[in-house]
Amino acid sequence: KNQVEQSPQSLIILEGKNCTLQCNYTVSPFSNLRWYKQDTGRGPVSLTIMTFSENTKSNGRYTATLDADTKQSSLHITASQLSDSASYICVVGTNNAGNMLTFGGGTRLMVKP
Amino acid sequence: ETGVTQTPRHLVMGMTNKKSLKCEQHLGHNAMYWYKQSAKKPLELMFVYNFKEQTENNSVPSRFSPECPNSSHLFLHLHTLQPEDSALYLCASSQERGISNQPQHFGDGTRLSIL
């Protein structure tokens, strides 16, 4: 069964600090891995998409890594800001018929002043 | 502004009511999706439309009825819902179903509460 597990479920950090969110998956056949940011009361917004051949991708202060061998990904946030408070969702796509996406349960990040 | 607009943003209805959720995308995409997001659960894909044709129905109860009159508009018709249907319903679009590595663009959802 395809699954995406994220850790931690929630995290509180102080403004200006760095943090790393984890994603482990058992999705086959693997096609791509995505990270989304979802602010409270809003829809998810795409941060990064990585394919099998990519092991890192950045979007401003967000850097995603991918280890396709161990089926792990991380999202690193540098110099956190209050606006980074949100849920971060890891999503893994397959390349079989329909390009199915499997969603993780998300990590809820709170950045405090 | 994501280019995907959902209305209404909030909806409260009784179990015997009939209502519809609307989604409109201004991105020129050909695939549109309905998702259900319940508290503390991953997003669940409900329906997929590609070039106005329904390509997936993930065992969704018949009390949810989708409609896609054109590639820019998607509706979700609701009738005789149950309390467990209370959730955030998200609409998304992408360039085309079947092409990998495309981002999906989400609307801000309709928060549905069933009394």
Image (cartoon, coloured by chain):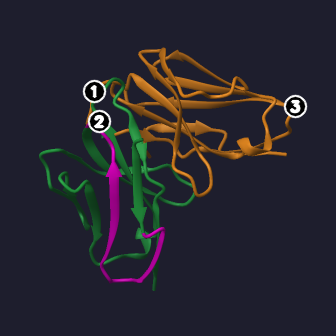
Name the N-terminal-most of marks 3 and 1.
Answer: 3
Q: Which chain is green?
A: A
Image quarter of the C terminus of chain A: bottom left
Question: Residue B13 placed where, x, y %?
Answer: 82, 40
- Viewer-proximal residue among B8 and A10: A10
Q: Which mark is residue B16?
A: 3
Question: Residue A66 placed where, x, y %?
Answer: 21, 56
Which element carries disc 1, helix, strand or loop? loop
Instruction: Look at mark 2 in the image and give the residue it sits on.
Output: B102
Amino acid under disc 3: Thr
Total labels drawn: 3
Amino acid under disc 2: Gln
Q: Are marks 2 and 1 in contact (CB under 8 Å)?
A: yes
Q: Is residue B38 above or below residue B32?
A: below
For label 3, count other residues whose C-alpha is less than 10 Å away and answer few (under 14), some (14-19) or many (20+). few
| Stretch of the chain drawn in magenta | A8-29
Q: Is residue A24 magenta?
A: yes
Instruction: Look at mark 1 in the image and give the residue it sits on.
Output: B99
